[in-house]
């Protein structure tokens, strides 16, 4: 399995597409739609890795007498999503080795309403690209940190392998990750930036994550996810 496949769960946790009848289908949640993505990770040292991700909507389900929408990734992880007047958010997940969904400590918003420039929210994330050089270790497994998101635009145009999408919601996320860089520098703050684009009637069409870092201990880089196929 490609070492970057772990992040499949993250895409569902923080960039899930869903459905809002009030907002022209930026978030399809009902049973049926499927998305295929290409994921390219480039480290600061020039290493390039390409992976793929598939997401499908399984429709409505009930857990603890509460109705949710269920989404499944190609890694077999299920995510339970809810929508109310405040927005769309994840409430639990179940990995392929778990019998029951594990509730999130608090709702993890994908999008906060109202859908208009300036709307803000925070959500917990972890590094997607940063890894330890020697010995190798997926650094994302050892740290989590809050990221601040806001809606930047409602009129963005995005070109991806699946086509050109207009009037997209553009979201920007920013955080400062405090981490031990190396013995010479010690502790430092690393800027982490995420951009996401959601197209009406489709959902997530592109995501970019930047984690610039290159020391004797850790290396970072960029991750770009692009929609290659959408099946309504």
Image (cartoon, rainbow, N blue to C red):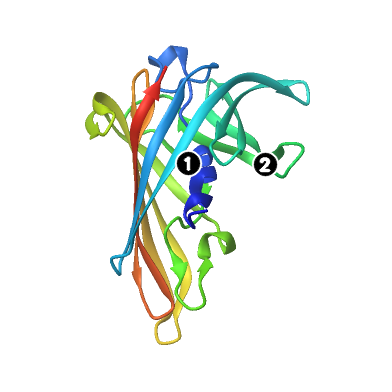
For the point 49% across and 32% down, which residue is it?
55
**Residue neighbourhood size for the residue with mark 2, other residues' Cα within 10 Å, grouped as few (<14), some (14–19), many (≥20):** few
Dot 1: few (<14), some (14–19), or many (≥20) neighbours within 10 Å? some
Residue that protrudes farthest toward the front in the picture: 1
From the viewer's perspective, is 95 left or right of 25?
right
Q: Residue at x 38, y 24 (%)?
A: 230
> Which label belongs to residue 96?
2
Picture coordinates of residue 169 (x, y %)?
32, 29
Is 140 situated left or right of 119 in this image?
right
Q: Residue 97's spot in the image, x, y percent?
A: 71, 45
Assign a secondary structure to mark 2. Answer: loop
Quadrant where the image shows the C terminus: top left
Is residue 58 shown to the viewer in this render? yes
Mark 1 vs 2: CB contact within 8 A: no
Query: What is the quadrant of residue 84 in the picture?
Result: top right
Residue at left offset 45%, top offset 50%: 147
Q: Is residue 197 visible?
A: no
Residues at marks 1 and 2, CA–CA distance in whole angstroms: 16 Å
Q: Nearer the viewer, residue 171 or 57?
A: 57
Residue 11's label in the rendered image is 1
Disc marking residue 165: none
Q: Nearer the viewer, residue 120 or 64?
A: 64
Furthest toward the bottom, the residue is 184
Q: Earlier in the sequence, mark 1 or mark 2?
A: 1
Residue 73, percent across and down?
A: 54, 36
């Amino acid at each position: 399995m490609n070492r970057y496949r772990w992040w499949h769960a993250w895409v569902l946790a923080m960039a899930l597409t869903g459905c809002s009848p009030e907002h022209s289908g930026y978030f399809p949640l009902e049973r049926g739609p499927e998305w295929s993505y290409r994921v390219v990770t480039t480290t600061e040292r020039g290493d390039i890795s390409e992976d793929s991700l598939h997401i499908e909507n399984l429709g409505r389900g009930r857990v603890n007498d509460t109705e949710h929408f269920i989404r499944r990734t190609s890694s077999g992880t299920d995510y339970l999503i809810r929508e109310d007047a405040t927005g769309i958010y994840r409430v639990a997940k179940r990995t392929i080795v778990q019998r029951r969904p594990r509730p999130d400590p608090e709702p993890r918003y994908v999008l906060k309403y109202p859908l208009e420039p300036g709307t803000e929210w925070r959500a917990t994330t972890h590094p997607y690209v940063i890894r330890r050089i020697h010995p190798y270790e997926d650094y994302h497994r050892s740290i989590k940190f809050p990221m601040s998101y806001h809606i930047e635009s409602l009129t963005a145009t995005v070109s991806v392998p699946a086509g050109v999408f207009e009037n997209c919601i553009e979201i920007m996320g920013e955080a400062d990750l405090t981490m031990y860089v190396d013995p010479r520098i010690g502790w430092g703050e690393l800027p982490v930036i995420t951009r996401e684009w959601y197209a009406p009637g489709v959902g997530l069409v592109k995501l970019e994550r930047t984690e610039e870092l290159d020391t004797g201990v850790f290396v970072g880089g960029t991750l770009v996810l692009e929609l290659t196929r959408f099946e309504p």
